[in-house]
Amino acid sequence: MNQKSKYSRREFLARAALSAGTLSLAASGLDLLNGCSSSGNGERNFFNEDEYHLVEAIAEQIIPTDDWPGGRDAGVADFIDIQLAGPYQRFQADYRRGLAAMERTCQELYRVKFENLPWDTQTAFLTRMEKGTLSSRDWDAGFAERFFELLRSHSLQGFYGSPRHGGNKNFVSYKMMGLDEIQTVGQNRYGA
Amino acid sequence: MSKTHVNAVVVGAGAGGGVVAKELSTHGMSVVLFERGDWVPFDAHDTDELLSQRTTVLGNAFGPDDARYRRVVENADGSTTVVFPSENDYNNVAACVGSGTVSYGAMAWRFMAEDFRMKSTYGSVGGSTLEDWPVSYEDLEHCYERAEWEIGVAGDASGNPFGSPRKKPFPMPPFTYNTEAKMLESAMKRIGLHPFPIPMLRNSVPYNDRPACVRRRSCCGFACPMNAKSGTHNTVIPTALASGNCELRTNCVVAELMVDDSGRITGVHYFDADGRGETQTADVIVIAASATETPRLLLNSKSTHHPAGVGNGNDWVGRNFQGHAYTGAFGLFEEDIFDDVGPGATIAISDFSHHNKGIIGGGILANEFTRLPYLFTGIRPPGSPAWGKEHKAFQRKYFRRNVQVVGPIQEMPVFDSRVRVDPTVKDHWGIPVVRLSGTRHARDVEGCMFLSSKAELILKEAGAEMTWQAVGGKGLSGGQHQAGTCRMGEDPKTSVTDRYGRIHETPNVFVADASLHVTNGGFNPALTIMALGYWVGEHITSEWQHGNRFT
């Protein structure tokens, strides 16, 4: 019997080409992780300016400012923007569709952008997304709940994850929780 | 070494494969050890919770990667979902030299005698393929001992009256309790339980030329920057390489077993680091690629003599896919308890591992590894808000005031919980991917409810102001404790390998990972996988030295 591999180089290349879109995007995501810690300078990776400001307002609702900075100041929108061009590329379509649907629904209901709504109205709107009680052609079959869960979990990741990914600026959540960045036992006791 | 014929190929440089490669190469056999991943750089993902091997939302720190790997999960309604390695449903095991032993929490449990005799102990269970192992605890005892001494375990079993009998003590003293463990120890003793320090594959003192642990909070899910955590990557694999008889080929993906006209397995087809198709011939083939990837390789190796895949003449390869349903309880306290002494888990009880009324098997209970900030965002009493002001305030108030007591329940193996290969979906290399299907046995939930109630009892006794249970045991099994898919047994009709891991249908092909487990115990399985590596390796070298060439 022929002892050479049955998987030829040619077949491998053909298969690789089939998934080339995925692969090239993944590569760019890795580059971003390596080269880009945070933006905040107006250069976006995925969001346009309107989307970016909407996500900032949502992140501020998920993690509101109190005695400690909230989602906006922690750079959660930067975190999500970077991840959507990297590991979260598979959520790009959901974000584009979901953010546009939020904008449209807010215009229909209030004739004003989400980020310009009163705080409690924003909270109520997000709660309706979470519970799936928004009635509009934009929110079919569980999409609102699913999209809200993306916004919620990604915001929490941006706020509570490592600053190397663009969120948690100045280690704000670690400081809030009393977790010094240097984590060897003993070193964070002095002066306590 | 070139790609000349070798005595043995080992597929997978993890807990089992690393040990086998060391056993064979130090006994004079020439070995090629294949690993689909690479060596792990210790500083790559130092403290990055989102990109670790425990929380994988931005990817698996140590592989497999989302770009090249896929799996298919069969849903209850028969539809299928393609899943990425960073998603929970993928059921990943790390793809790197050492595999999970680089980034595990490193609990070093011996199974108990009952765990090898589940059917004899509890009788048959409807809907389950519950069975005894063809080897006993006594058979494996010296293999556990070798794993503890050669790879390195810190512990003290004297406080555990239910522990397996042992001939030698641990090579290192146990880790001291952290503050929450001291609190739990008193509570456990007050209600008549028997707490003891968790045995750990970590250096409590300098050992094997590596330093002692400095107890960081980012340990479980991370590579140790001190090199104090013991895996196969910093013990047996370096020993194998130093023997001069073992070549490690990293970034090489084994696709299929080679077969000759007589049906004998002659080696492996694989893709090298550049994606080139290559072959490697050997007298003996040992597969230790995990309980998902080992059956995948066998099932992908179809030929005239092995029309359903190698070892699959009776349709048992990939069956009885099991893991551990994790179950336990949370408690909130009025005072700070968190002292940042990692890795968090330090104390356990084995009181509920066996002989619980109305329950088959059971599990240990231990305090949990440190819940890092993002993971903690998911820990809230039932009905609490999942976002907003109150959620943030809880994060701040209770991060240092929460305790989790949790354990793995011994699952009842289910014949239709299984690993197959998908008929259409392929990975980056064009190899058909794993397709997972089935659900856990209904009795697993009963075990979980039992163990969670005990965990809550302990937390209440410890003085928690509020407690709640988190009960596992439903849905598809698997996870990082995956096991059972190439069961060992005496009867070729109802098992895949013999008692030495040799596939019944092929004289020279062995399995040496958790796929062999007939049942998976109520314990983290790493030390048992290592012990099986010694068990299989000792058999192969002993036979080889007596002239057996497995023809």
Image (spheres, rainbow, N blue to C red):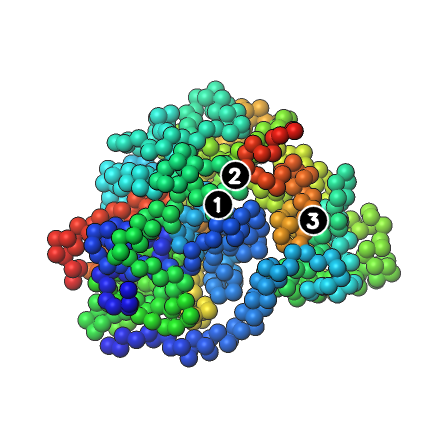
Q: Is residue B376 left or right of residue B277?
A: right
Residue B466 image-quadrant placement: top right
Mark 1 = which residue?
B225
Q: Nearer the viewer, mark 1 or mark 3?
A: 1
Q: Nearer the viewer, mark 1 or mark 2?
A: 1
Let me know if residue A131 appears in the view: no
Q: Nearer the viewer, residue B100 or B204?
A: B204
Residue drawn at x 75%, y 44% is A69
Let me know if residue B551 appears in the view: yes
- Label 2 packing within 10 angstroms: few (<14), some (14-19), many (20+): many
Residue drawn at x 62%, y 52% is A164
What label does residue A169 carry, if any? 3
Helix, strand or loop under label 3: helix
Determine the CA span between mark 1 and mark 3: 25 Å
Determine the CA span between mark 1 and mark 2: 10 Å
Residue drawn at x 74%, y 57% is A40
- Label 3 packing within 10 angstroms: few (<14), some (14-19), many (20+): many
Position of A129 relative to B468 (above/below): below
What label does residue B216 carry, if any? 2
Have a look at marks 1 and 2 and say if they share a chain: yes
Callout 1 amino acid: Pro
Outermost residue to the right: A111
Give x and y (percent) for residue A169: 69, 49
Q: Are marks 1 and 2 in contact (CB under 8 Å)?
A: yes
| Badge 2: chain ID | B
Give x and y (percent) for residue A137: 74, 65
Give x and y (percent) for residue B183: 52, 24
